[in-house]
Image (cartoon, coloured by chain):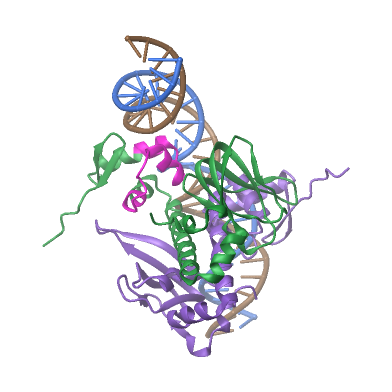
Chain colours: A green, B purple, C brown, D blue
DNA sequence: TCAGTCATATGACCCAGATCATATCTGAAT
DNA sequence: ATTCAGATATGATCTGGGTCATATGACTGA
């Protein structure tokens, strides 16, 4: 609903790719052909340093766009490897640039999408910077991050699922959260209204 | 040099603000007037949750843009408070939107800037997700993050400076880094050429 | 229906990194 | 010159969260 920005592009602009583990979508220094969106599975972006070791730049999962910056550069700056098979959309760079130049609203929407991503990554960084597991979990729940599974939630905020479960239970015991079902937790309203 | 994108805007579009601690630049729900750039000092973006506690969304320091998304929305979604006094540029939303609609290159440059920011935040998130202090420090040095002080570097990668210094020393002892000066460290080339 | 897989949940143990303390060096301000 | 603040650096101690183990519930597919 919010970001089927690219589904407005002509059908020819989007190519569906079924991926298997270890498939390579593009490699560093290859000319850019477009950006991608993960529908199912996981794509890991990696770069090899001058010294030779591998840096993971990003792991894109369901719903995530990646290689957005490729639209504005000539070469990919990293490798894209499928670490979990699934489906990936390839969105044509040419079609995107064409539409960006001709459709003001599309351009503004794309900018807004990128700006919102910047926002949300900054926020996630702040959350992961919270040292205490309890406070981090509370902040993340407050932010509405616990929408699917606890395990997924835990990895998102850089905690083990064990530490996460423990923090959730403690927060419940403290009365700061309530468990509303298996794997479901909610904020407790502070009764500070007059 | 790279992002004086906004210095091309007419002089009237940029307003210089001298800030003191606890100054408020904008508040949640106020109508948006523009984005900002920190020149000196620190600006913290905060939001109050339904339950009443405060979430820190971002802490912008020297060189950082913030509130980019305000250009595409009607109201600020958080408070901006100066936690360290200094200087801040206010960049007019109207002037920005005007230029975006009239200057294709400006629009593309702004999108590219946002896309690069998304990239770098994703990468920083991956780095902070590395559990071992040594590996995290090595990755961050490889990425060129140790450009100013070690203390600044340490906070960026979510480590205490003590843990950071220890990791740097161990990496030097292991021969994976060399110290080239007080607070200066470099990667060691792996001699694996034929 | 039953095995197999994955999420949920919690307890025990241990270690890596936070915390605290200390010392030196550097640069800026007075 | 001298003080002071802050960065650099390292050592000692302690604790919170990682790791490992275990158990159960929920769903899936044979």
Coordinates of residue A41 in the picture (x, y in percent): 52, 39
Q: Nearer the viewer, residue A129 or A79?
A: A79
Q: Is residue B49 above or below residue B98?
A: above
Residue interval drawn in magenta: A139-166
Point 38% across, 49% down: residue: A136
Q: On the rendered structure, is B75 left or right of B194?
A: left
Which image quarter is the N terminus of chain A in?
bottom left
Numbered disc total: 0
Evaluate whether residue B150 shows in this view: no
- In magenta stretch: residue B161: no
Coordinates of residue A179 in the picture (x, y in percent): 25, 39
Q: On the rendered structure, is A85 left or right of A174?
A: right
Q: Nearer the viewer, residue B173 or A135?
A: A135
Q: Nearer the viewer, residue B89 or D4?
A: B89
Q: Which quarter of the figure has residue B153?
A: bottom right
Q: Which quarter of the figure has residue C6?
A: top left
Evaluate whether residue A115 shows in this view: yes
Q: Nearer the viewer, residue B25 or D16?
A: B25
Point 60% across, 48% down: residue: B136
């Amino acid at each position: 609903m919010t970001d089927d920005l690219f589904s407005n592009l002509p059908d020819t602009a989007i190519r569906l790719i079924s991926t298997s583990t270890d498939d390579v979508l593009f490699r560093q220094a290859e000319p850019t052909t477009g950006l991608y969106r993960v529908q199912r599975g996981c794509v890991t972006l990696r770069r090899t340093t001058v010294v030779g070791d591998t840096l993971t730049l990003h792991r894109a999962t369901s719903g995530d766009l990646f290689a957005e910056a490729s639209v504005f550069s000539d070469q990919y700056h990293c490798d894209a490897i499928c670490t979990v098979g699934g489906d990936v959309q390839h969105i044509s760079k040419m079609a995107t640039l064409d539409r960006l130049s001709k459709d003001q609203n599309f351009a503004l929407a794309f900018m807004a999408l990128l700006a919102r991503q910047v926002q949300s990554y900054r926020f996630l960084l702040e959350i992961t910077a919270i040292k205490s597991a309890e406070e981090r979990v509370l902040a993340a729940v407050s932010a509405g991050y616990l929408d699917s599974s606890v395990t997924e939630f835990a990895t998102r905020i850089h905690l083990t699922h064990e530490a996460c479960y423990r923090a959730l239970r403690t927060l419940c015991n403290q009365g700061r959260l309530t468990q509303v079902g298996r794997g479901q937790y909610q904020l407790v309203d502070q009764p500070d209204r007059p």
